[in-house]
Amino acid sequence: MGRPHREALFPPAATDRLTRLVDIEPHVVAEDFDHVPHLAAVEILITSWGCRPLDAAVLARMPALKAVVHAAGSVKHHVTDACWERGIHVSTAAAANAVPVAEYTLAAILFANKRVLEIGGLYREHRNALDWADRFPGFGNYRRTIGLVGASLVGRRVLELLRPHDFDVLLADPHLDPESARSMGARPVELDELLAVSDVVSLHAPALPETYHLLDARRLSLLRDGATLVNTGRGSLVDTEALTAEALSGRIHAVLDVTEPEVLPAASPLYALPNVLLTPHIAGSLGGELARITRSALDEVERYCAGREFAHPVNRAALTTSA
């Protein structure tokens, strides 16, 4: 991992716990694999953001490696086919990282239906009480329709957070059977129907060739007037040019934590539109939330040392349809 990530993820208390579990030189950080002592003896590799690909050449220098514990989300950037062919066990803290993303999403949904951002902007501008119901007829969260695209770890966590609220929840995921969707409190529908009837659409699909620009101009045009699009998934899921055109028309609203490209050009109209909120990829674990990821990773190391199965194993086959 990158050294800054090591410092953020493993403060003294976490490092102390790690040194009690395994034989480690706690201040050695492998930003690459060229100048790492005792590499041939490494049995467990703790990785995070910035890890170099574990290809066949790297693995040849680690003949004792049996497990990779990833203190972050997706392992696609560094766990290669060579890892699976070697039979290396892989774990990820993606479930821990899903928690703040889902929390951000819930907040975005609640604020969107209440028109908090727009009303806050108008209140700041006019500094007086206005007839908000006249300006935003029907605003509020009661019995609104929420459409989730993708039953990913984040998507499932969002479904849990939505349960206490008076929402009608729809779910579109081609890899999920209808009964499973219903068991999670959602009504399974096709994507086009979800887009056409939802008050808020939240994206939680993985970035795959078949999901590139999943929401193109045609699908964005299906969104009902006044609907809000929330994207905490991947920027590539949305055609930015088509979304910009829709947002400029004022017909829809958007809350975007990820975009394509990331960062958007400084001249992008999306920065200044009152019906768009842009945030710089902050939904995932940051600051104090990193401690949850660290705890998850250390729990997995402890399980491995005790001869137990990982609680959050990564399945090679599942990577074809996940982040």
Image (tube, rainbow, N blue to C red):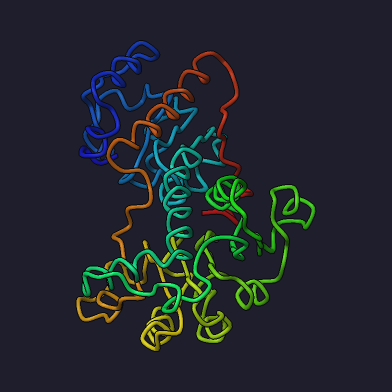
The quarter of the picture where the N terminus appears is top left
Count of labels shown?
0
Location of residue 273 (image quadrant): bottom left
> Measured from the top left, where is residue 134 in percent x and y?
44, 78
> Measured from the top left, where is residue 318 in percent x and y?
62, 49
Going by the image, does 220 lie left or right of 29?
right
- Residue 106 vs residue 42, the one in the foreground: 106
Say if residue 317 shows up in the picture: yes
Location of residue 309 (image quadrant): top right
- Residue 64 vs residue 97, the one in the foreground: 97
> Which residue is painted at 42% across and 80% down in the image?
243
Going by the image, does 210 lie left or right of 253?
right
Q: Residue furthest right?
A: 179
> Measured from the top left, where is residue 18 in percent x and y?
35, 18
Say if residue 56 shows up in the picture: no
- Residue 198 vs residue 77, the one in the foreground: 198
Location of residue 116 (image quadrant): bottom left
> Measured from the top left, where is residue 176 in percent x and y?
71, 56
> Which residue is painted at 39% across and 78% down in the image?
240
- Residue 46 vs residue 193, the one in the foreground: 193
> Which residue is painted at 34% across and 71% down in the image?
118
Q: Give the vertical position of 40 relative to 316 (above or below).
A: above
Q: Give the vertical position of 165 relative to 306 (above or below).
A: below
Going by the image, does 264 lie left or right of 222?
left
Q: Give the vertical position of 12 relative to 205 (above or below).
A: above
